[in-house]
Amino acid sequence: MATAFTPLRRTGRWVQEDRPAGLFKVSREAFTSDDVLALERERIFDKSWLFLGHGSELKQPNDYLTRRVGGRELIFNRDRKGEFHAFLNTCPHRGAIVAREKCGNALGFKCFYHGWSFNNNGKYATRTPPGVYPEGFGNDGSVDLARVPRIESYRDFFFVNYDPNAIGLHEYLAGAREVLDLVADHSPNGMEIIGGTQEYSIRANWKLLVENSFDGYHAMETHGTYFEYLMSVIGTSVNDDIAGMEDVSRGIDLGNGHAMIEGRAPWGRPIGRAIPAWGEDGKAEIDAIVTELTDRVGETRAHRIANRDRNMGIFPSLVINDIMAITVRTFYPEAPDLMNVSSWALAPVGESREARKRRLDNFLEFLGPGGFATPDDVEALESAQRGYAAAKFAPWNDISRGLLKEQPGGNDEAQMRAFWRAWAARMEDGK
Amino acid sequence: MSTATQFAPNPVATAQPARADYEDFLYHEAALLDEWRLDEWFALFAEGAIYEVPTAGAKDDVDSAEALFYVADDYGRLRHRVERLKKSGAHSEFPRSDSARLVSNVRILERGEAGDLVGCTFVTYRSKNDLTDVFFGHMLYRFTVIEGALRITDKRVMLDMNNLRPQGRISIIL
Amino acid sequence: MATVTFIAADGGEKALDITDGFSVMEGAVRGGIDGIDADCGGEVSCATCHVHVAADWIARLAAPSEDEKDMLGYAVDTDECSRLSCQIFLTPELDGLVVHIPPTQR
């Protein structure tokens, strides 16, 4: 649902809305233009909170990992006291990448090019003979590893912002905070990223994956073969259950460009919805999990956590889907028609081996490049991107579905509109 | 072109298949997959077999109960994978991609009571929508012999690339 | 494994067990010993992991490399027992090693 502050009509260059008429259009140029991408870098990726990593990825002091975030190579690490840092992974000397391994544990970093060394808190730590550099060279921090201007966390999700003047993460997250709480509350012992990252690319504009990640409308058509598989395992009819889903599902604007769909899907949920295929032992384990959850958070909240599926997008390009497993997914544009995707599985700390295997099997059946669903999404997005070459003659995407409804469902497009309005506010209105 | 039917491997001696027997088998498997003869390919697996593709760069003994993979199919799911690929609803493979699988460096790594462990190196090319992508790495197979024929009990595809980039699917069977 | 005793400038003593192959510096930094700054983390770049090795141990250590000797020139108030602790790697033969931590590394 749109907030009270959004205008009823907009005729922007890329985003057009006429709410009384029930129409919302997005220009295909937004997906193909190099100029749009350059402006997105300036106004969105350099001014928004971008997901850096989860605290569980750095379990010990001196742990580090390297990751490309919003177009820049970063080091995400903990110093000797265990404090979290984010540095630009480029030598202050002449730019070479300093930390060249994916992850590790190190008290300091040394650049391979000329040997400049740094404490893992970023401080320059290299002695040179007198007379080589000015007296006191480096004492002012000017040749320390460059820090990312802002780093903040919420429930162990760490974010960075390249804008030193950005509003705080807490405020930025708006209604998404509540959903992060629902995810973090799956566990009495905290959540952790399970090892093994899926790293792939899609030859399509990054915003296509934003839309796809919380799109309920495509489930039957694009993922028919997954649901046929699921129903054969579970034992109900595809059409009955998908139709049942529609009654419960909602598209929700979480503010600041964040949005989600929340509903009830037929698949099993490791946090609290067993399916017959999991057998008696599986059901018993799920019952115990739900009992613990209910004791901890109360019945209403436990029911929402256990029995509702959520696909959330945090502006601009963080997706957290709490569905048949929990996936955390980021994607950044390398070009208007190429994005690099990183996908992780998030799970409760201390899960039994059986529960974790069940969760991972659930994940892989649907999610990821080898699943029964994601490859077809990749095909759809790449197909759309190829279709946009005709933009001169077919210039607009239609994102009107459900605009006239009081409460749009998961199969409507309210969640996409929430994203696009925030995108347009930055890109067209300079907000 | 039906090279798979014309040149199927001969029955093997139950005592101890030779390296060449395994190599013949793997060439035959590759031909079946290149030719999209998926039911015959599935028949190469013994009941209860598993097919796994861990994420790129994982260790050979990575555990699918502890790490996120790309594919961790038990026998039932593998059968569904094959069924799915035969449907036009498997959009990523409709129309079907073109592929060619190279198999090399075939070695018997271990002779075992539970079946031999065989390794090979592979390169698979997949072409679709005017783009060709490459998968490469090594594979680890466990075999058993059933009525004179080799059958796979365990197939593990180890991707030796950095990651899947610049592409984004494992929609064919590797 | 070797037990190493660290004597601080004020005389306080602390002993740590350090696994073979790790350096005295690493053991100290990870074991919470103060006074060994080790800014560069063991890359022979900063000379702030300086220690005075006990006189009866100095000759029993493997000789310093040219890199270490060069870098030792930057350390503060060195003497003939001075070593960079990031270059002293533990072996069972060094069990009982004693080092003195200087009052300052800068």
Image (cartoon, coloured by chain):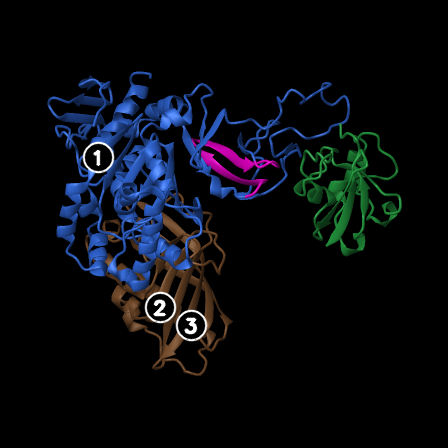
Q: Which chain is green?
A: C
As measured in the structure, the alpha-carbon distance from the residue carrying label 1 to the one carrying label 3 is 54 Å
The residue at the point 71 percent across, 20 percent down is: A136
Q: Is residue B72 above or below residue A409?
A: below
Question: Which numbered marker is on residue A150?
Answer: none
Horizontal arrangement in the rendering, residue C94 relative to residue A87 (left or right): right
Subunit ID for the residue under disc 1: A
Q: Where does residue C52 sit, x and y in percent of width and height?
A: 83, 38
Q: Local crowd at mark 3 within 10 Å, few (<14), some, or many (≥20)?
A: many
Please name the residue that numbered disc 2 is placed on: B49
Q: Colour of chain A?
A: blue
Q: Is residue A228 left or right of residue B127?
A: left
> Is residue B172 on the magenta stretch?
no
Mark 1: which secondary structure?
A: strand
Left or right: residue B125 versus residue A406 is right
Same chain for the residues at labels 1 and 3, yes or no? Answer: no
List the residue tagged with mark 3: B22
Q: CA distance from mark 1 to mark 2?
A: 42 Å
Residue extent of the magenta highlight = A60-82
- Viewer-proximal residue, A4 or B29? A4
Residue receiving disc 1: A251
Cα separation between marks 2 and 3: 17 Å
Q: Is residue B165 left or right of residue A309?
A: right
**Residue at image coords 86%, 39%:** C81
Specify the amino acid type for callout 2: Ala
Toward which corner of the image does residue A181 lie, by quadrant?
Answer: top left
Near mark 2 (Cα within 10 A), the count class, few <14, some 14-19 or many ≥20, is: some
Q: Is residue A63 magenta?
A: yes
